[in-house]
Amino acid sequence: MRSLKPLMMISIFLALGATVVGCDPSKAELDTTKATLASVTTERDGLKMALDASKAQAAALQTQLADATAKLAAVAVAAAPAPAAAEPAKKEEKKAGHHAAKAEPEKAEPAAPAPAGATSGPATETRKGRGHF
């Protein structure tokens, strides 16, 4: 038994030494991983702040757009002439006999311009199937 005690002591020291030597490369890797994590966390926080600022700016621009649209509508209503109240009523005279069918047509007001996105051309759907080239 006495000869086993020094052998056990040597094996314990070798195991302890191997453990210490084995941890050194992983400690350096752990330190670089911690540094990378810190930089990524800082970058993420900066991006979150930029996102919040963009959302606030979008909300402000939306309110400005609503205000501008309301002002434009108010100006359009104020600039529109009064339709029939300002003009005196005209009496139409009926023609007698065969001239009644040739009555003068009423002049229509010019049509309002189409909205910017609307088109008056053909439909835009894609035609498929036989006979459509």
Image: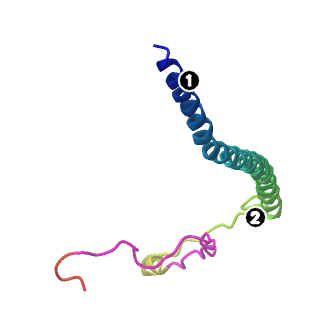
Q: Amino acid at mark 2?
A: Pro
Q: Position of residue 93 (x, y in %)?
A: 59, 71
Q: Which residues are magenta?
A: 103-128
- Label 2 CA crowd tier, 10 Å (few <14, some 14–19, many 20+): few
Residue 10 vs residue 94, the one in the foreground = 10
Element assignment for label 2: loop
Q: Would you identify the image quadrant in which residue 94 lies?
A: bottom right
Residue 86 vs residue 68, the one in the foreground = 68
Residue matched to label 2: 88
Q: Amino acid at mark 1?
A: Met
Q: Residue furthest left?
A: 130
Q: Is residue 58 left or right of residue 119?
A: right
The residue at 61%/39% (across/down) is: 23
Image quarter in which the N terminus is found: top left
The residue at 18%/83% (across/down) is: 131
Q: Is residue 124 left or right of residue 89?
A: left
Q: Position of residue 32 (x, y in %)?
A: 69, 49
- Would residue 105 be counted in the magenta stretch? yes
- Would residue 47 be counted in the magenta stretch? no
Count of residue discs: 2
Q: Would you identify the image quadrant in which residue 92 lies?
A: bottom right
Q: Is residue 107 left or right of residue 103?
A: right
- Label 1 CA crowd tier, 10 Å (few <14, some 14–19, many 20+): few
Residue matched to label 1: 9
Q: CA distance from mark 1 to mark 2?
A: 121 Å
Between disc 1 and disc 2, whose residue precedes? 1
Element assignment for label 1: helix
The residue at 55%/26% (across/down) is: 12
Q: Residue furthest bottom?
A: 133
